[in-house]
Image (cartoon, rainbow, N blue to C red):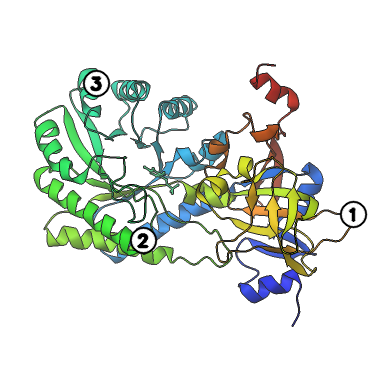
Amino acid sequence: MTNSYSDLIHQTFEFPQEGFQIKNGYLEFHDIPLREIIEEYGTPLRISYLPNISRKIELAKKWFSDAIQKNGYDARHHYCYCTKSSHFRFVMDKVLSMDEVHLETSSAFDIDIIRHLSRAGQIKRSTRIICNGFKTREYLAKVSTVINNGYPFILPVLDNVDELSYYEKHIQLPVCNIGVRVATEEEPNFQFYTSRLGISRSKILDFYKEKIHTNPKFKLRMLHFFVDKGIRDSIHYWNEFKKAVTTYCQLKKICPELNSLNIGGGLPIRNSLGFEFDYSYMVDQIVSNIKQACDENQLPVPNIYTEFGSFTVGESGAVIFSVIGKKQQNDAELWYMIDNSIMNTLPDVWGIDQRFILLPINKWDRPYNRVNIGGITCDNSDYYNSEAHVSQLFLPKLSQGEKEPLFLGFFHTGAYQESIAGHGGIQHCLIPYPKHVLVDRSPNGKIDHSLLFDQQSSSRMLSLLGY
Ligand SMILES: Cc1ncc(COP(=O)(O)O)c(C=O)c1O
């Protein structure tokens, strides 16, 4: 029985596995030599590996086109990228460089991004823009302006019944396409029963009959739903899915122009080396269940829209820290202190107990010990000490006076973390925001990297604070 960290990983998981391998004693992420990157840029460090974005889009589009073909499904799938999962320009550039990828927006400023990209020629007139979310007056006004300017494929999705009266007053075109979002029910153990997002299922049919059907200005084209816990092969998911498809069929019977079902986001990403999810099976089930319901009701099948956010960008991101200190607080509790904050850089860990793939970059030949990782803010909650597959954390043992620190990588962190953390803003305990490195591949396969943002400086943070 051997007991190095490397043995532990090889005994617990299939390893090496997609995206992760050891070369010359150091971890590589999609062949990126992390050791060189760390030597060049130092830590703490965010990395965005752009080829993972295009790969994910291609994969999901293929699963849908295969399922559509297999099931003889007579309508199309439209892949939308949900911009809120990462608004960075480099992400949008990559997404929009792909064929037939559409966008989903969530707020007024999102529409400014759309206008900006449109002026830059990156948004084609065939790109569909699905405007979701609760609309402030500013958001409503911006959506209406884009519609009035004659952009053909923008579709506001009504989050509540009042939204329609704004469009009624402000949209100057004779006909406007719209969608509606039906609220789903939360899991039984959640804090509330029905999601606040969307219009309750019991009201949607009457709302359509009374306010949309009677108004020649509006054509209802899309029904949207989103199950907050994501697309899982679980009883809860399939219940909510079936309810939404039933609502679609009920609406379609009285609204012939309805032609699209938007199933939202929520396709999961790998958050552990032990992660298993049969994507193509799940997509096939989604497509075949919609078809079956439509066949039973003798209705044509709808176009399927998806709005995958985490799935598009999540696996492109990584955050790397150095362990800068070790604290044995009692017989059982050993802390590895890192050179930044978990709370500030990976707020989902703190906010929703999100787990990511965590691996050391070096020292895989050492014995391992159970540890807690501590961030350097003074906050008790700034820690990480369990993994998705097991409620504890093991990392290589450290001895005194080592020349090279232990480097830790949190992987698949590319979605939501920067926007929730407030990239470049004021940080807890004024711990500066890490630098950010972009990694791409040139056409000949060579890995290129460059610094996108330097680590936040004291003067920038102080100026935000009014000094
Ligand atoms: C309406 C809607 N669509 C898409 C998404 C994206 O979800 P995910 O990032 O899990 O794919 C969200 C996330 O909150 C959402 O609210």
**What x and y, as percent, mark residue 328?**
78, 57
Contact between labelled residues 3 and 2, with CB atoms less than 8 Å apart: no
The amino acid type of the residue labelled 1 equals Lys
Comparing labels 1 and 3, the label whose residue is closer to the camera: 1
The CA distance from mark 1 to mark 3 is: 66 Å
1 or 3: tag closer to the N-terminus:
3
The amino acid type of the residue labelled 3 equals Ile
Which quarter holds ligand 1? top left
| Residue marked by disc 3 | 171
| Residue marked by disc 2 | 283
Q: Secondary structure at mark 3?
A: loop
Compared to 340, does 6 lie above or below? below
| Residue marked by disc 1 | 403
The CA distance from mark 2 to mark 1 is: 49 Å
- The 10 Å Cα crowd at callout 2, few under 14, some 14 to 19, many 20 or more, is many
**What x and y, as percent, mark residue 115?**
44, 25
